[in-house]
Image (cartoon, rainbow, N blue to C red):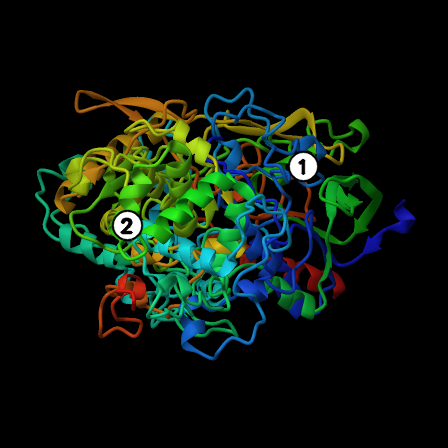
């Protein structure tokens, strides 16, 4: 087979943010790059995705994209018969442990890992497009907050904010970030002198404006529990940096507020990695799609090739076994698929624990930003279901002395009413469908069909203008807020290989996941703050947990047992962490394997800790830093 | 998971027809040249009473106007009323023609006797929407729950089986009911979004920054009262 291999200078596995960014940087320098993409290639336009989305009964993040999760009769397709499967929001409910429905094998897990990802050219295109930076202390948790604490769970990164700063600037240019730098000076964030974001900020929604007014004047007694080390008498709502055009940028148009960033922006005003990937391909990068990497081959301590399997159809079968040879290899397959590939690479028993795994850290420290969500009804309309899904956030609480004791959070303000779930209860579906059905059929799944909200009899079944008036009044007052919470790294939260196979005969990822007490204490503070915010807004609380919610856990807060749950943020992080010590980390600060000097592992899997910022900007900045390192290596080899 | 609703297996309109352009914008613009029949022949229909399909469509629109609370000029933008006898009106051809999609859907998915009863109620009470509501509410269950399915169709572009509505109709029930998205076009034409001052998610015709302003703001670039509730001309 070796004689039959495709050859190039740099081989990359995965064409998402990290893979595309590195490919594009290398191609600009004339370096010969080939990318293996497990899923289909780049589509000429989004029309087919949009049609699939419009027709989907459940408009979950994966709904526009292949492969199908449900067959034409609405039944789950067994992931054993899918060539390049992936997790789905449809398999994080009561069926989360059913391997005939769920791609991830979570049968042995304490709690469900609820985040999902895509496997197609461009990677996770269903992202929200939010691009805040990590703050300086996020890189130095041990040094800043762990001193004198036995078993403090959060290590330092091997780099500081200052090291990544110039790469943040470059990543923001590539992604096309809209933000106002004058508004972003909080939590010790600093910027390059005279720095300006590529585009002006995205305007605040009516809901953002309402929250900003309500939280302009707080009692420091009500906020003392936050432990900020200073009195908090106001919370500032700031526009959130977003990879979303506020004006035409690089041949893409300005956001038109389709309120559909997740799963898909119909006009590509939100950046997605196919944009950089197309540039890379124009520059000479070769994209090999429908190509699933199955083994990383080693020779004398260096990577000597990658075997991959080809297929034609979503359901398989395999159509060929091929290989790719290069001087340098980059695995950019995300926080679950990258460790899966490393662990699968056993080299006929010569690397029984997989490649790059002398530390036994590959697959460990799986993290997300578990989200505490609050659902409410305002006294006056703010007209949700309009604008980008999120335009503003409260970031100022993401850092402070409380981090010695509990996890940090940010607060993002939703512009989509009760569209993702109704009241946090996944049992009934999403709005506007649920509330509409309630008032037409005299039901009350939403909780809204009561006299005190409708001014009509409880459980009204309406026709005509009573119906239009009631729905218009209630739906326009809905809101949700989210608290993405920092998850501490836990070696037992882990990706390993399942005995279950996918449609190509490869072992599927097996997940063990739990939420630590440090992180749970972050939920406690989030619940308390949510109550303060709802009170200031005059909002009625509709937050509840469904009867069979597998993510449910209880916490006693102010003497009362609260039934809590969490949502996944789609942030798959930590499973091949970077560090100085090769015994406790997998890669160095350049994201290069400690074990194999021509192997780089990139993406948010290298994050030792995750702060509270959405990871895409940071992983993109790190990818650009790694690209520079690879360019230096290639040039020194040629010289 | 219960959140899941069944996928529609019917083929949808191609995107070029379902369009990037709203019904409102299309109607305001050029006259449609698409040769779509005002009233489709009821192929595969079990609804046999197609003796006067044009009048049945008018009755369907009068029924829908009363039950949805949305003017027939919004439901059928090219509706041309006959000033002597409303039942002799021309339902009109518009480029979206979602009324035909829905009427055909109903005739292939619902009991012919219930459809006939609803159309007769609309014909009998054609001048008083309130009377249509009263009579529908007083009808037998099969007829009443079909009426609810029809309103859900207009509001959401999704079909809820009348039998499923009936099974979950005890006051205050909390239960998911599965439904089918009729087509991509039907989703983008759902009325509830406009009723809430919004637009179907993933289908907006508005411009950058509109979300920072009230949808009823007359001074905004997309401002003005929603056309949804304008009184019918008849």
| Location of residue A163 with respect to A609 vertically, above or below | below
| Name of the residue lying farthest toward the bottom | B30
- Residue bearing mark 1: A342
Query: Does residue B42 appear to the left or right of A38 in the view shown?
Result: left
- Name the secondary structure under disc 2: helix
Q: Quadrant of residue B163?
A: top left
What residue do we see at 68% from left, 70% from top?
A282
Q: Chain of mark 2?
A: A
Residue A273 position, x and y percent, is 56, 59
- Label 2 crowd (10 A; few <14 / some 14-19 / many >=20): many
What residue do we see at 53% from left, 48% from top?
B49
Residue A231 position, x and y percent, is 12, 44
Q: Kindly indicate whether the residues beneath marks 1 and 2 are on one polypeptide chain.
A: yes
Between A326 and A244, the one lying in front of the other is A244
- Mark identifier at residue A464: 2
Query: Does residue A140 appear to the left or right of A572 in the view shown?
Result: left
Q: Chain of mark 1?
A: A
1 or 2: tag closer to the N-terminus:
1
Residue A203 position, x and y percent, is 30, 65
Alpha carbon separation for disc pair 1 and 2? 61 Å
């Amino acid at each position: 087979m070796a004689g039959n291999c495709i050859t190039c200078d740099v081989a990359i596995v995965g064409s998402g943010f990290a893979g595309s960014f590195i490919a594009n940087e290398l191609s600009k320098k004339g370096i010969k790059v080939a990318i293996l993409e497990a899923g289909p290639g780049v589509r000429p336009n989004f029309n087919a995705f949009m049609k699939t989305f419009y027709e989907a009964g459940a408009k979950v993040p994966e709904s526009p994209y292949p492969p199908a999760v449900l067959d034409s009769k609405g039944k789950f397709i067994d992931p054993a018969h899918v060539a390049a499967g992936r997790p789905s929001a449809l398999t994080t409910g009561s069926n989360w442990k059913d391997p005939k429905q769920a791609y991830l094998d979570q049968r042995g897990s304490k709690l469900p890992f609820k985040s999902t990802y895509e496997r197609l050219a461009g990677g996770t295109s269903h992202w929200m497009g939010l691009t805040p930076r990590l703050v300086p202390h996020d890189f130095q948790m041990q040094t800043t907050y762990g001193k004198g604490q036995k078993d403090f769970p959060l290590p330092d990164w091997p780099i500081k904010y200052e090291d990544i700063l110039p790469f943040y600037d470059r990543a923001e240019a590539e992604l096309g970030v809209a933000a106002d730098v004058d508004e972003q000076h909080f939590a010790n964030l600093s910027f390059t002198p005279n720095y300006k974001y590529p585009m002006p900020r995205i305007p605040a929604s009516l809901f953002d404006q309402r929250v900003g007014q309500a939280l302009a004047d707080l009692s420091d007694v009500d906020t003392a529990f936050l432990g900020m080390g200073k009195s908090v008498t106001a919370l500032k709502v700031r526009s959130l940096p977003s990879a979303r055009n506020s004006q035409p940028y690089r041949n893409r148009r300005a956001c038109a507020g389709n309120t559909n960033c997740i799963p898909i922006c119909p006009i590509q005003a939100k950046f997605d990695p196919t944009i950089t990937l197309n540039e890379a391909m124009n520059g000479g990068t070769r994209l090999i799609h429908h190509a699933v990497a199955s083994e990383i081959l080693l020779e004398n301590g260096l990577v000597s090739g990658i075997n991959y399997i080809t297929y034609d159809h979503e359901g398989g079968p395999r159509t060929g076994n091929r290989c790719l040879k290069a001087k340098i290899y980059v695995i950019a397959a995300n926080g679950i698929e990258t460790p899966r590939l490393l662990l699968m690479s056993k080299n006929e028993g010569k690397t029984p624990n997989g490649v790059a795994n002398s530390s036994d850290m590959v697959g460990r420290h799986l993290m997300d930003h578990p989200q505490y969500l609050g659902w409410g009804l305002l006294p006056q309309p703010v007209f949700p279901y309009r604008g980008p899904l999120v335009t503003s956030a409260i970031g100022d609480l993401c850092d402070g002395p409380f981090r010695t004791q509990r996890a940090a959070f940010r607060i993002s303000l939703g512009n989509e009413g009760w569209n993702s779930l109704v009241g946090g209860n996944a049992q009934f579906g999403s709005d506007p469908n649920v509330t509409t059905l309630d008032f037409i059929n005299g039901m009350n799944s939403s909780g809204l069909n009561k006299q005190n909200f409708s001014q009509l009899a409880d459980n009204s079944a309406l026709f005509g203008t009573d119906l239009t008036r009631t729905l218009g009044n209630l739906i326009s007052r809905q809101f949700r807020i989210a608290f993405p919470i920092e998850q501490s790294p836990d070696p037992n939260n882990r990706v390993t290989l399942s005995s279950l196979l996918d449609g190509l005969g490869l072992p599927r990822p097996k997940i063990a996941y739990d939420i630590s007490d440090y992180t749970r204490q972050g939920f406690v503070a989030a619940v308390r703050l949510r109550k303060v915010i709802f009170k200031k807004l005059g909002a009625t609380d509709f937050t509840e947990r469904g009867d069979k919610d597998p993510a449910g856990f209880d916490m006693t807060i102010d003497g009362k047992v609260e039934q809590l749950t969490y949502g996944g943020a789609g942030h798959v992080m930590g499973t091949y962490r970077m560090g100085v010590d090769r015994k406790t980390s997998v890669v160095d600060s350049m994201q290069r394997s400690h074990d194999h000097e021509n192997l780089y592992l990139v993406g948010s899997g290298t994050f030792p800790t995750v702060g509270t910022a959405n990871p895409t900007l940071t992983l993109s900045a790190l990818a650009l830093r790694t690209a520079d390192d690879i360019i230096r290596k290639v040039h020194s080899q040629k010289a | 998971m219960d959140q899941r609703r069944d996928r529609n297996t019917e083929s949808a309109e191609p995107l070029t027809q379902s369009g990037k352009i709203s019904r409102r914008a299309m109607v305001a613009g050029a006259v449609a040249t698409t040769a779509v029949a005002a009233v489709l022949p009821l192929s595969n229909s079990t609804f046999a009473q197609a003796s006067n399909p044009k009048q049945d469509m008018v009755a369907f629109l009068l029924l829908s106007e009363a039950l949805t609370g949305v003017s027939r000029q919004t439901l059928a933008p090219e509706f041309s009323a006959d000033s002597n006898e409303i039942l002799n009106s021309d339902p009109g051809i518009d480029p979206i023609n979602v009324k035909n999609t829905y009427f055909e859907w109903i005739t292939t998915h619902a009991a012919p006797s219930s459809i006939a009863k609803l159309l007769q109620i609309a014909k009998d009470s054609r001048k008083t929407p309130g009377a249509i509501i009263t009579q529908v509410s007083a009808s037998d269950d099969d007829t009443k729950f079909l009426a609810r399915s029809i309103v859900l169709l207009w509001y959401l572009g999704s079909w809820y089986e009348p039998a499923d509505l009936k099974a979950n109709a005890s006051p205050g029930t909390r239960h998911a009911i599965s439904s089918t998205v009729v087509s991509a076009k039907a989703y983008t034409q759902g009325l509830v979004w406009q009723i809430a001052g919004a637009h179907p998610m993933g289908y907006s015709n508005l411009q950058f920054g509109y979300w920072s302003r009230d949808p009823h703001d007359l001074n905004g670039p997309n401002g003005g009262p929603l056309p949804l509730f304008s009184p019918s001309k008849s």
